[in-house]
Image (cartoon, grey):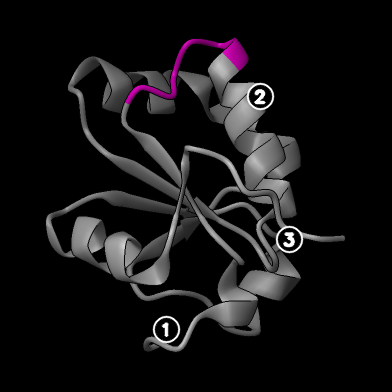
Amino acid sequence: MFGFSNSFSIDQEEFQKKAAQGAHIIDVRSPQEYNEGHIKNSVNIPMNMLGVHLNELKKYAEKKEVVLLYCLTGSRSAFAYRFLNKNGLTEQMYDLKGGIARWNGSLG
């Protein structure tokens, strides 16, 4: 699948800048993919588990905290963004354009 190009998608430089400012980083890939390598300081919440974590994510939104989403190529995180948008949670939420496949920063 190809990544989406949307206004909520940001490049790696912007992603790293927001992460350095304390944004919450959420990896929406499977636990197996996450264990094979992930962006430092990220938390694994697989896309199919986002509904279970809505209350936690709503707390971030209420506090106007920035949330960064990523997956392998940007497709799943774009879908995750849309799911969260339907639940009113995307005011301060961004998706990593191209996903971790294009990431050249450090991994955890």
Crowd band around label 3 with a 10 angstrom C-alpha radius: few (<14), some (14–19), many (20+)? some
Determine the CA span between mark 1 and mark 3.
16 Å
Q: Looking at the picture, does residue 91 appear above or below residue 34?
A: above
Determine the CA span between mark 2 and mark 3.
17 Å
Residue depicted at 35% across the width and 41% down the height: 67
Residue depicted at 39% across the width and 70% down the height: 12
Residue depicted at 31% across the width and 70% down the height: 13
Q: Looking at the picture, does residue 80 appear above or below residue 99?
A: above
Q: Amino acid at mark 1?
A: Gly
Task: Please state the horizontal and vertical placement of residue 33, each as a whole percent of the image.
Answer: 71, 73
Q: Write down the residue under mark 3.
A: 30
Determine the CA span between mark 1 and mark 2.
27 Å
Mark 2 against mark 3, which lies toward the viewer? 2
The label shown at residue 38 is none
Question: Which one is earlier in the sequence, the residue at label 1 or at label 3?
Answer: 3
Crowd band around label 2 with a 10 angstrom C-alpha radius: few (<14), some (14–19), many (20+)? some
Q: Looking at the picture, does residue 42 appear above or below residue 91?
A: below
Q: Is residue 87 magenta?
A: yes
Query: Mostly what secondary structure, the magenta segment?
Result: loop
Crowd band around label 1 with a 10 angstrom C-alpha radius: few (<14), some (14–19), many (20+)? few
Range of the magenta residues? 86-91
The label shown at residue 83 is 2
**The N terminus - image quarter:** bottom right
